[in-house]
């Protein structure tokens, strides 16, 4: 019986892939214990317990993107976080990390203790935490091929899919036309009505929400139905006959399948789930970070399944004047989704098993 620790918290982009791999590991090794590391306030406090796994919170090391007085606290915060991780990992056999603030101190503690570490990088451009962790371990996996740095020789595993998306993909493969039609019916939307799904990530996007609010009257006039995931922390607008705002989408697989067009950020998980089930997308990359969201969407653009626009150019005027051409492009896009990420969780679990055996 082994003790496995998973590190990946903050946003769904880190948590959902970790949960997918944890489920595979548990199915293959039912007697092993699994613990997730997280921080208070992160989305993991909802998702991990709901999935039936144990969550242990560690002190958060917050690093602002721009220089600020908060940087003076980084050494003491990091020491406290590494110390907590050390106490957890000293009785563990393997660490599996997915990046984000919670992973960096875990990687350091695992290195000190000699605990084997597996790292999965979801973005086309690796984040700072995983770049740090990659210095300590040869067991690396990526969702996309990486052109430079330590991840160039990593296992290209894909990005693990959530259960509902994975199951919908398996079901849809036999008849994509029927799968998309049935999904639209389950959402209560007429089959002949164009459906546009708009979302700004697990926390929502004030910038995207503002554009939608201004463009809605024109979209309604055109007979377009809009499902809008506004984010749990944002105020929920009023619904109408052609507009359905939601704080959070529970039937995400159905929405991916049913939508003629998706307008969204291009986080790694969003791109992966869209690749599996979606038809056509307009991606508005988050204009902060290291530019990973722009790179995440490039493969889908090359496949003729998406377009990219800078946030500074995405406004109500653009949306209303381009919606017809976007829907036309969607009609010409393939009906089929992609199985590229279907085996990702199994591949990462196999790499983790290898790392454990090599200890």
Image: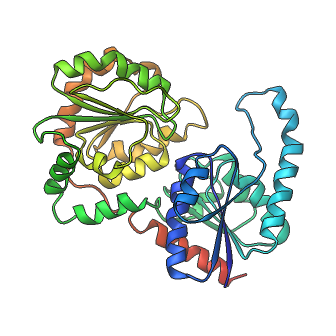
Q: Residue furthest left?
A: 192
Q: Nearer the viewer, residue 310 or 30?
A: 30
In the displayed structure, 118 sits above or below 195; it is below
Residue 290 left/right relative to 114: left
Residue 315 left/right relative to 47: left
Q: Position of residue 129 (x, y in %)?
A: 69, 50
Q: Position of residue 3 (x, y in %)?
A: 69, 76
Image quadrant in which you'd find residue 337 = bottom left
- For the N terminus, the image quarter is bottom right
Image quadrant in which you'd find residue 6 = bottom right
Q: Nearer the viewer, residue 240 or 28?
A: 240
In the displayed structure, 134 sits above or below 123; it is below
Q: Residue at image x 83%, y 63%?
A: 86
Q: Residue at image x 38%, y 18%?
A: 315
In the displayed structure, 319 sits above or below 6; it is above
Residue 234 left/right relative to 354: left
Q: Is residue 340 visible?
A: no
Q: Nearer the viewer, residue 125 or 220?
A: 220
């Amino acid at each position: 019986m082994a003790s496995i620790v998973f590190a990946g918290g903050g946003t769904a982009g880190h948590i959902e892939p970790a949960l997918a791999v944890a489920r595979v590991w548990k199915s293959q090794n039912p007697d092993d214990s699994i613990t997730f590391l997280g921080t208070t306030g992160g989305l993991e406090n909802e998702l991990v317990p709901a999935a039936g796994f144990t969550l242990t919170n560690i002190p958060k090391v917050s690093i602002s993107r721009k220089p600020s007085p908060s940087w003076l606290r980084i050494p003491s915060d990091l020491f406290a976080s590494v110390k907590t991780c050390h106490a957890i990992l000293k009785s563990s056999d393997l660490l599996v990390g997915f990046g984000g603030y919670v992973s960096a101190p875990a990687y350091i503690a695992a290195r000190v203790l000699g605990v084997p570490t597996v790292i999965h990088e979801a973005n086309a451009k690796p984040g700072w935490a995983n770049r740090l962790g990659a210095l300590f371990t040869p067991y690396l996996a990526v969702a996309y091929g990486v052109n430079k740095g330590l991840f160039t020789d990593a296992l290209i595993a894909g990005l693990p899919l959530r259960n509902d998306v994975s199951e919908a993909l398996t079901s849809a493969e036999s008849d994509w036309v029927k799968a998309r039609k049935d999904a639209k019916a389950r959402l209560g939307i007429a089959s002949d009505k164009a459906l546009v799904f708009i979302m700004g990530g697990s926390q929502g996007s004030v910038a995207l929400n503002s554009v939608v609010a201004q463009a809605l009257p024109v979209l309604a006039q055109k007979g377009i139905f809009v499902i809008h995931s506004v984010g749990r922390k944002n105020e929920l607008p009023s619904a109408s006959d052609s507009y359905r705002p939601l704080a959070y989408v529970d039937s995400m697989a159905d929405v991916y399948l049913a939508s003629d067009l998706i307008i969204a950020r291009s986080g790694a998980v969003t791109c992966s789930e869209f690749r599996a089930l979606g038809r056509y997308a307009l991606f508005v990359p988050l204009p902060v970070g290291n530019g990973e969201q722009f790179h995440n969407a490039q493969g889908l653009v090359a496949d003729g399944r998406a377009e990219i626009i800078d946030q500074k150019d995405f406004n109500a005027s653009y949306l209303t004047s381009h919606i017809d051409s976007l829907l036309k492009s969607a009609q010409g896009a393939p009906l089929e989704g992609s199985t590229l990420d279907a085996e990702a969780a199994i591949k990462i679990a196999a790499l983790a098993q290898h790392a454990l055996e090599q200890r």
